[in-house]
Image (cartoon, rainbow, N blue to C red):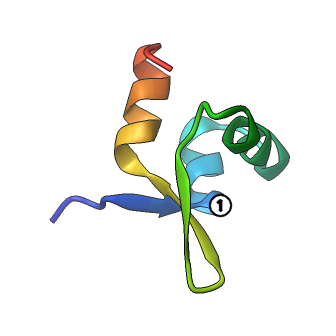
Amino acid sequence: MEKHAYSINETARTLSMGRTSIYAMIADGRLEAFKLGRRTLIRAESIRRLVAGQD
């Protein structure tokens, strides 16, 4: 089964970036995030769009 959301750490590893950069992209609106309890998760589709250059 494909994942629909990734943690901040998973996203940082996937994009070869730091956590601070991931939070900055969330603040800029380039990555779509949501809270699930205390966790911040990034939608997989948002990561795909960013990588494809459609942000």
Q: Residue furthest bottom?
A: 37
Residue 34 appears left or right of 49: right
Q: Position of residue 21 (x, y in %)?
A: 79, 39
Q: Position of residue 39 (x, y in %)?
A: 62, 77
Picture layout, residue 54 above or below residue 21 = above
Picture layout, residue 17 above or below residue 52 = below
Badge 1 density bin: few <14, some 14–19, many ≥20, Cα 10 Å: some
Instruction: Please tell me which residue is depicted at 29% across the width and 61% down the height of the picture.
Output: 3
Residue 52 appears left or right of 2: right
Q: Which residue is the site of mark 1?
A: 9
Q: Secondary structure at mark 1?
A: helix
Quadrant of the rendered image containing residue 2: bottom left
Q: Quadrant of the N terminus?
A: bottom left
Instruction: Please tell me which residue is depicted at 38% across the width and 48% down the height of the picture.
Output: 44
For the residue pair 20 and 14, the one nearer the viewer reads as: 20
Instruction: Please tell me which residue is depicted at 84% across the width and 47% down the height of the picture.
Output: 20
Picture layout, residue 5 above or below residue 46 = below
Q: Position of residue 55 (x, y in %)?
A: 50, 20
Instruction: Please tell me which residue is depicted at 65% across the width and 61% down the height of the picture.
Output: 9
Q: Amino acid at mark 1?
A: Asn
Q: Residue furthest left?
A: 1
